[in-house]
Amino acid sequence: MTKNEFIGKEIMKATRSAGTLLLLLASFSVLLLGILDYYVVSENFPKFIVYRVICAIMLFALHFIFRRVEKKEAQAAIIVLATIIAAIMVEIMILASGGYRSSYYVGLALVEVFVLGFLPISLNIAAIVAAAISVIYILPIVLFDTIADIKIFINNNLFLLFFTIAGLSWRYFNQKLLANNIALQYDLEEQKNISKSTPSN
């Protein structure tokens, strides 16, 4: 096995381990955050809890699927799908609680933190995740909401942009560090194997 193959294999194992745990935690976190709905938008609590239960069930199901996938392409697809599911749930809540004025847009930043902060995914997949979240936030508001105060909308987007840039930067440097550590591990194993195969005098 070449060094690059070893690095790819180890990163995929790390992604499976982290992703399996994260999807499980996310499914429960989505429900627990429903407590905030009760205090912040109590009038929307009954329907919001339905959205949360549906999202949690879908993420929980993806958790079981993800732990069994063997290919990195399948891993990436599930990660993007889970992100879209969570982001759509948040966006529906945004539209139902004031549209572009809603403070629920912070939920999209939390989705970015979860995915970009804790999953050892490539920068390309991280960029797809960030782009999906941005589109899911901006497009429905532009299409279905009336933006009377553009400053608030720009402020919200700048806030999300900050999280996107920070998340992508973190993912880039963290992924590079992870690859370097795995490469070092490979080199040490190779040196150990060479030492074992070299006859002693």
Image (cartoon, grey):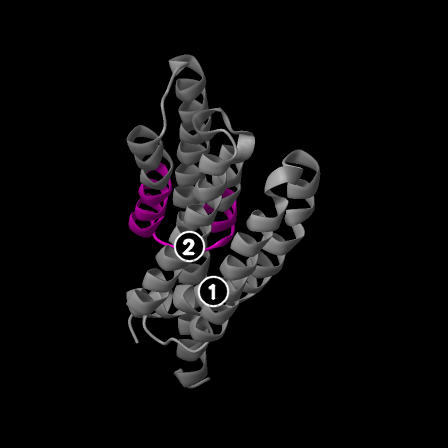
* x then y, percent, for residue 195: 44, 77
Q: Is residue 180 visible?
A: no
Residue 81 showing in the rendered view:
yes
> Residue placed at 36% from the left, 23% from the top?
146
Number of callouts: 2
Q: Mark 1: which amino acid?
A: Met
Q: Which mark is drawn over residue 85? A: 2
Q: Is residue 106 magenta?
A: no
In contact (CB < 8 Å): disc 2 and disc 1: yes
Q: Position of residue 37 (x, y in %)?
A: 64, 42
Q: Quadrant of residue 121?
A: bottom left
**Above or below, comparing residue 12 to residue 104 in the picture:** below
177 or 74, which lies in front?
74
Residues shaded magenta: 113-134
Q: Position of residue 161 (x, y in %)?
A: 40, 29
Position of 128 with respect to 186 (left or right) is: left
Q: Residue at 37% across / 70% down in the picture?
A: 9
Q: Which residue is mark 1?
A: 58
Q: CA distance from mark 2 to mark 1?
A: 8 Å
Query: What kind of residue is marked 2?
Result: Ile
Viewer-side residue, 14 vs 73: 73
